[in-house]
């Protein structure tokens, strides 16, 4: 998660948060914990009933290996019966494609059954695509 960033930047950010100087070892330890936490979140079991499933591709600009680059965050949300929105998962990809969406949805299916009504928000899509959702 943070391995592409310069250690001095992370050290400075942590120092600001903690109000004291931070060593490279501390930056590495925090990075390791963050990476493990994010990986566990991506693997968590999903088991709930949702009123709606929302799929959205969001264009983001992120810094990778010292350069700002455009990526697409494929996001899958659920609206629960109590009207609360929950982010199931996201996948960061270079471009939006059927293969990438399929990968994200198959991963969600492996992690647990998600029961919901599906509505297609993009009525301009061909009927066959809407029917496959």
Image: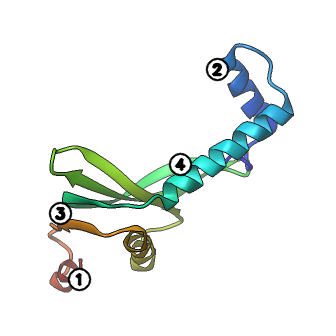
Q: Cα distance, mark 2 to mark 3?
A: 41 Å
Tell whether label 2 touches label 1 (CB within 8 Å): no
Q: Cα distance, mark 4 to mark 1?
A: 30 Å
Q: Nearer the viewer, mark 4 or mark 3?
A: 3
Tell whether label 3 touches label 2 (CB within 8 Å): no
Is residue 73 visible in the rendered structure shown here? no
Residue at horizontal 72 percent and vertical 46 percent from the top: 32
Is residue 33 visible in the rendered structure shown here? yes
Which of the marked residues, 3 or 1, is nearer the chain's N terminus? 3
Name the residue that disc number 1 marks: 132
In the rendered image, residue 14, in percent from the top left (x then y), is placed at 70, 26
> Quick check: 17 above or below 122?
above
Which of the marked residues, 4 or 3, is nearer the chain's N terminus? 4
In the rendered image, residue 85, in percent from the top left (x then y), is placed at 26, 46
Among the 4 quarters of the image, the one containing residue 12: top right
Q: Nearer the viewer, mark 4 or mark 1?
A: 1
Q: Quadrant of the C terminus?
A: bottom left
Among the 4 quarters of the image, the one containing residue 19: top right
Name the residue that disc number 2 marks: 17
Name the residue that disc number 4 marks: 61
> Quick check: 47 above or below 25?
below
Horizontal relation, residue 22 to residue 123: left or right: right
Name the residue that disc number 3 marks: 121
Which secondary structure lies at badge 4?
Answer: strand
How crowded is the residue under tag 3: few (<14 C-alpha within 10 Å), some, or many (20+)? few
């Amino acid at each position: 998660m943070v391995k592409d960033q310069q250690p001095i930047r992370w050290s400075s950010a942590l120092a600001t948060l903690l109000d004291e100087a931070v060593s490279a070892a501390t930056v590495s330890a925090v990075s390791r914990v963050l990476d493990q936490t994010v990986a566990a979140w991506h693997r968590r079991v999903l088991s709930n009933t949702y009123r709606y499933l929302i799929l959205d591709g969001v264009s983001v600009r992120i810094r990778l290996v010292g350069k700002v680059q455009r990526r697409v965050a494929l996001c899958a949300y659920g609206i629960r019966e109590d009207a609360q929105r929950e982010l199931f998962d996201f996948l960061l990809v270079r471009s939006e494609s059927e293969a990438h969406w399929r990968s994200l949805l198959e991963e969600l299916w492996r992690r647990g059954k998600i029961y919901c009504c599906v509505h297609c928000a993009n009525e301009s899509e061909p009927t066959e695509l809407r029917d496959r959702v």
